[in-house]
Image (cartoon, rainbow, N blue to C red):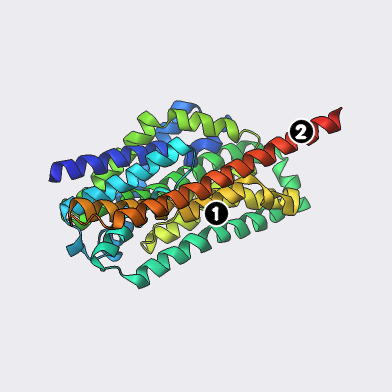
Amino acid sequence: MSISAILIGLFFALNIGASGAAASMGIAYGSGVVKRRMALLLCAFAVFLGAYFGGGEVVKTLGNGIIPSETFTIAISIIVLFSAALSLFLANILGIPLSTSEVVVGSIIGAGLVYQTIFLEKIAWIILFWFLTPFLAFLLAIIGQLVLKVKPFQGLLRTQVAVKILPLLLIVTGMFEAFSAGMNNVANAVGPLVGAGVMSIESGILLGGLFVAFGALFLGAKVLETNGKRITSIRLEDGCLISGTGASIVTIASIYGIPVPLTQITTSSIIGIGFVKEGLSVLKKQVVMQLFTVWIVSPLISMVLSYTLIQILIEHNFYPIVVVIGVLISVFGVVFLQTRKDAEMALTSNVIERKGEN
């Protein structure tokens, strides 16, 4: 059973690396600063370094900071990881972007609810960081964008020196973001395994770091391509601001052992830049509503799945199933209605634009 647990954790690490590649080096690749293969190599290298040298604190949090390590049997660690992976799989089918950090924390909370062994103070700190870090990224992006709009900086950005330095700076900040992702995200795959005593922290961050890096290198090309094409309109200085802001926040959170959602932090930085350029209208866009949906849905789905599977498979208690099914129907119903509303709004907007052109 230990081997099965390790295989599930490492498979999860591969997928974390694949999805994290675009988040870190997508801007550098999309702007043409670095080729695809080199972008993936740099991402894999930086992700591994971040995991190996700085991933230990978040591993400790997920291994014994949310629930006691005594609660983490091998069977429960398998269910926790399976619930997180299944949540991501269901979300991908429905087109809902979820945070790996949030689904793993949700799965662990589900296990803690079964045995009533949750450290509430630690959970409160984690949830507080989930809300504060994207908001901080939003504010820092606004400040940075306003600074870049000052005339001296505008003049500096047009010089030949800036033209040569900005591409290099974009690669460095992209690698810094990948490094921070390794610090924070490797724990999502190996934290429950360390809590169950299947592996030590040292072997967990080594193996987890390697497989996150392999995932970025060998499975991240498609995600990198998609993300790169989306962000080609972002200026180099904006890309440095986004990557640098997100990486700094995630690194600080990782030092204190707090798992945070890098995707939401990066998205919040982009929204902050958009806020300076477009004003309040950017806050009404679909991406903002999607951000709030992810905050709510990510931990809730995995928590419910973990709680249910432990009750059925380990405790042989089938009574909670009715309640759980009701919760899942409610959650997916809200998401479906929100998606339908967004689609209708987009359709209405297109119709109005066509009428204006005619």
Which residue matches tag 2? 351
Residue 55 drawn at (x, y percent): 32, 53
Q: Nearer the viewer, residue 93 or 52?
A: 93
Q: Is residue 131 visible?
A: yes
Residue 179 drawn at (x, y percent): 41, 47
Q: Is residue 56 visible?
A: no
Going from the N terminus, do you reach mark 2 or mark 1 first?
A: 1
Q: Residues within 10 Å of mark 2 (few under 14, many from 20)?
A: few
Residue 330 drawn at (x, y percent): 46, 52
At x 30%, y 53%, the residue is: 321
The three-letter code of the residue at mark 1 reads Phe
In the image, farthest residue toward the left:
1
Horizontal side of 239 relative to 199 (left or right) equals right
Which of the 4 image quadrants contains residue 112?
Answer: bottom left
The three-letter code of the residue at mark 2 reads Val
In the image, farthest residue toward the bottom:
121
Residue at mark 2 to residue at mark 1: CA–CA distance: 27 Å
Which residue matches tag 1? 292
Horizontal side of 139 relative to 313 (left or right) equals right
Question: Which numbered disc covers residue 228?
Answer: none
Q: Where is the N terminus found, in terms of image quarters? A: top left
Which of the 4 image quadrants contains residue 42?
Answer: top left
